[in-house]
Amino acid sequence: QPIVAVVGRPNVGKSTLVNRIIGRRQAVVEDVPGVTRDRVPYDAHWNGRRFTVVDTGGWEPDAKDRAAAIAAQAEIAVQTADVVVFVVDAIVGATDMDEKAVRMLRRSAKPVILVGNKADNQNLELEVNSLWSLGLGEPFPISALHGRGSGDLLDAILAAMPPAPAIIEGVRRGPRRVALVGRPNVGKSSLLNRLAHEERAVVDSVAGTTVDPVDSLVEMDGEIFQFIDTAGLRKRVNQASGTEYYASLRTAGAVEGAEVGVVLLDAGEVISEQDQRVLTSVVEAGRALVIAFNKWDLVDEDRRFYLDKEIDRELKRIPWAVRVNISAKTGRAVDKLAPAIRKALASWEKRIQTGALNQWLTALTQATPHPVRGGRAPRVLFATQAGVAPPRFVLFTTGPFDAGYQRFVERKLREEFGFEGSPVEIAVRPRK
Ligand code: GDP
């Protein structure tokens, strides 16, 4: 989601403007323990577009050169932003400090929207025209306090953002798409047949949806799911026809078209290379993941002992997968499949509030900082969730992170916020 940084000298009304943008009357957080006062992010939306607003209200009160300190704060915010809102006091007019900031903004080459704040009346609105002299284009007269002009400003901010992704997040039509995958003979057709017959409905069409003829619609637990590319399973041709190569192409295609991969493993046999490849295809495609151990009816105490060890060893890179133990043959726990799929998809589409994310991350990195590298320990400036399905996070930092520390952050992120059943992507963007 795009980032909008609000920068400007102290007391020009940045926090009031941020309040106006996020639509809250309350003053923005001044002092929350664990939250950096320098750049505080908030979630906002306008005309259906979500974005993050970063308030750069705080500054180093003890800094020798206050202007330089503020400029440095602003610079960090600007570098991480997609759009910059530069606020000038309309009553005071442009000062030397403003001119300095303008030079930095020019160097950044980011789109800048110039705001003359405190234009509480028509006379002051006219005064704002003098800000043309800053060379940042048309100044927007606003009164953050009274709300005057804020709608036009928000329109301008939206217009300056990178274009919205073609797929609108959160809008989904039709049934959930599931890829039922696994190596030959793990019981895919048996499971599909059981689901189709026991749970009754393999429907041919659902009003308002288009379903590929190779797909199957199956009702489980009162909800219709679309199983992708099951033609081969229905006709039971997959064992007879095709090499492993074609089987893997087929798997990749089904996973690509699905939101969640249900990977069937044979609980009676060791987890093989081929099983691993199927699991990898789901994880690398960024889909939600459910692992179903099938043929659980064959698992006795002995097998259970070895299976637990195998799971520890072979599945340790994906401890977050949702797991169910089923038997397509007896029907055991097959009713657990729908809840498992729903749980994985909920994680896959989960969104963490920017404030909560940063508060948690600040506390975490303070308690366990990154190890010192080249005389310095890289710090997190701030973090944002860039998207869902799967959840993607961007960490803006003062330097590159070790792979080990990045894994630590992911593990802690999962502990804090869940995400069971979904891959999570974390990108670290060091400040240049
Ligand atoms: P696919 O290749 O993955 O579609 O596997 P199939 O559904 O054709 O099943 C392969 C073999 O495993 C068949 O002989 C099934 O009867 C058997 N099978 C499938 N599910 C189970 C199960 O839960 N328990 C047992 N004991 N056998 C099963």
Image (cartoon, rainbow, N blue to C red):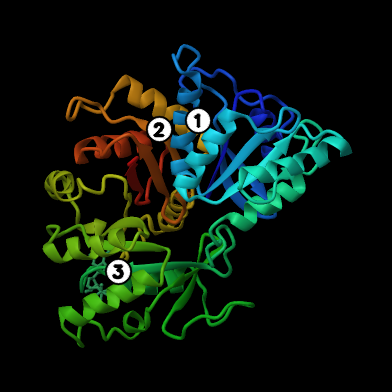
Rounded to the nearest whole Å, what is the CA distance between mark 1 and mark 3?
Answer: 46 Å
Q: Categorize mark 3 by other alpha carbons within 10 Å: few (<14), some (14-19), many (20+).
A: many
Image position of 3 (left or right of 265):
right
Q: In the image, residue 19 lies at what x, y percent?
A: 68, 33
Q: Residue at x 25, y 56 (%)?
A: 296
Q: Label 2: which residue?
A: 381
Foreground pick, 367 / 188: 367
Q: Residue at x 79, y 35 (%)?
A: 119
User: Could you tell me the amino acid type at mark 2?
Assistant: Leu
Query: For residue 94, what is the image quadrant?
Result: top right
User: Could you tell me the amino acid type at mark 1?
Assistant: Arg
Mark closer to the chain start, 1 or 3: 1
Looking at the image, how many numbered discs can be counted on the residues? 3
Image position of 122 (left or right of 286):
right
Residue 33 is at least partly visible in this image: yes
Q: Label 3: which residue?
A: 181
Q: Categorize mark 2 by other alpha carbons within 10 Å: few (<14), some (14-19), many (20+).
A: many
Q: Label 1: which residue?
A: 39
